[in-house]
Image (spheres, helix red, strand yellow):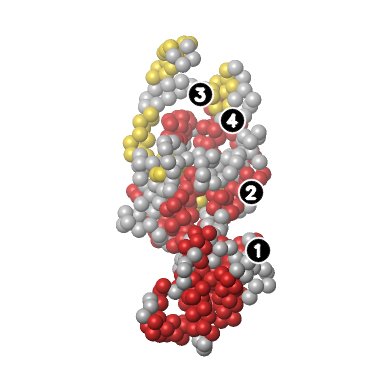
Amino acid sequence: MSESSQVRVRFAPSPTGFFHIGSARTALFNWLYARHVGGTFVLRIEDTDKARNTDESLRVLLEGMRWLGLNWDEGPEVGGGAGPYFQSQRADIYAAYRDRLLASGRAYEKDGAVWFRLEGERYTAYDDFKKSEVEKVRSKPIVIEDAVRGRVERSEETDFVIFRNTGDPVFHFVNVVDDIEMGITHVIRGEDHLSNTSKHAELFQAFGAPLPQFAHIPLILKQSGPGKMSKRDQGALIEEYAKRHFLPEAVRNYLCLLGWNPKDDREKMPIEDIIEAFDFKGINKGNARFDERKLSSLNTEYLRELPVESFAWLARPVLAEAKVLDEAADEDYLQKVLKLCQPKARSIEDLPDYLAYFFREDFTQDPKATKKIAGRSDFTEVLDLLVALLSDVEPFEVPNLEATLQAAADAQGAKVFSWFPVLRFALSGQSGGPDLLPMLTVLGKDRVLARLARSLDAAAH
């Protein structure tokens, strides 16, 4: 077994709510590092909070992980040799480790709880916060060589609880025990856990276990203003992007850039390239600010590069739900429409409004376009001319359309592009959209002439 293949990382979420974008980024960085070095990515569920853990939250978490393509090597629904992978199923393991500390004198019972005893010189100090005297310890500082933060020196000054008086173990204890039992070699987690590291290091040492390599990654800040992005902030939940039909590849790519840089100014990268380039040296120390506009822009880039067959497969249910097309809609026609619209489409969720007129005759007319274009003094004159010109075009293809319209414009001393806004509005009710002449060929001659006639009739009344 190579040294790199012995690397074991873990993502240990609590299923108490939704799948937060910060948690997803932590899972992603662990997954990337495991894939980069050929190691093992473990998914461990910290479900000891009985009051808040729900099956629905677990389902959302697992679905979100799979949606992002973060397949785990060991964990729920996969198995592995270091299970169980739910903390609620590991009570006997925690009790055994507790008893080891009690037997060695590194733990003691007080007020119904079990406390971890720090080693060092003890003294009494006044606690300004609690307004009382407390016993403190002058212990040797814990030094961590963090792979991202560099040298970090911290120390604990008071003993701390490892089992509550309810008999339940606390986060710090189970976190360390699980990492020892599961052979975790690298702990990659958010910078907000840095303050826990000295407690965890004390526990590792008390059990005679080697410290894992810590790597505390930067926080994700909300889009505007100070503070860490929370579940209440817009754009903070992975399931939002799945429901809005973002491409998971785009979301994953963007998450990679929140705190990591390939050092070559690339942003849009295939996941294989990211895996190859990912290492701790590329992780930034400064916090990353979330920017949904940048994510949307990256999603648009991915969308425009999809094979049209894939684009159609993703778009059809969205268009059907919006009642733009029915299940029996012709696939060839749908793909022609999407191929035409793809270069300018921004997102799948916007497609119903963007291309409804290709499938429906009761399409909406943009009020601004109505005022600006249908209000032109030459509106009906241009429509009459277009009907006459387009009626004679055969076959109804772009080169013939272009030649016919340009010849007529030259003969009249007009600019052909001055007619295009009227033509587009009559056909779509919009002032913008995909390339106009290809749009005519996709709609077809009969539909184009019928819509021009209908616009003329509406203008006359």
Compare marks 2 and 3 and give the one earlier in the sequence. 2
Alpha carbons under labels 2 and 3: distance apart: 34 Å
Q: Which residue is mark 2?
A: 59
**Dot 4 surroundings within 10 Å: few (below 14), some, or many (20 or more)?**
many
Q: Which residue is mark 1?
A: 323
- Identify whether 264 is placed above or below 232: below
Q: Secondary structure at mark 2?
A: helix
Residue type for callout 3:
Phe
Q: Nearer the viewer, residue 11 or 244?
A: 244
Please give the label number shown on residue 168.
Answer: none
Which label lies toward us, 2 or 4?
A: 2
Alpha carbons under labels 3 and 4: distance apart: 12 Å
Q: Quadrant of the N terminus?
A: bottom left
Alpha carbons under labels 1 and 3: distance apart: 60 Å
Residue type for callout 1:
Lys
Left or right of 78 in this view: 274: left
Alpha carbons under labels 4 and 1: distance apart: 53 Å
Residue at 49 percent of width and 80 percent of height:
385
What is the residue that sits farthest to the left in this orientation? 264
Residue at 36 percent of width and 52 percent of height:
261
Q: Which residue is mark 3?
A: 160
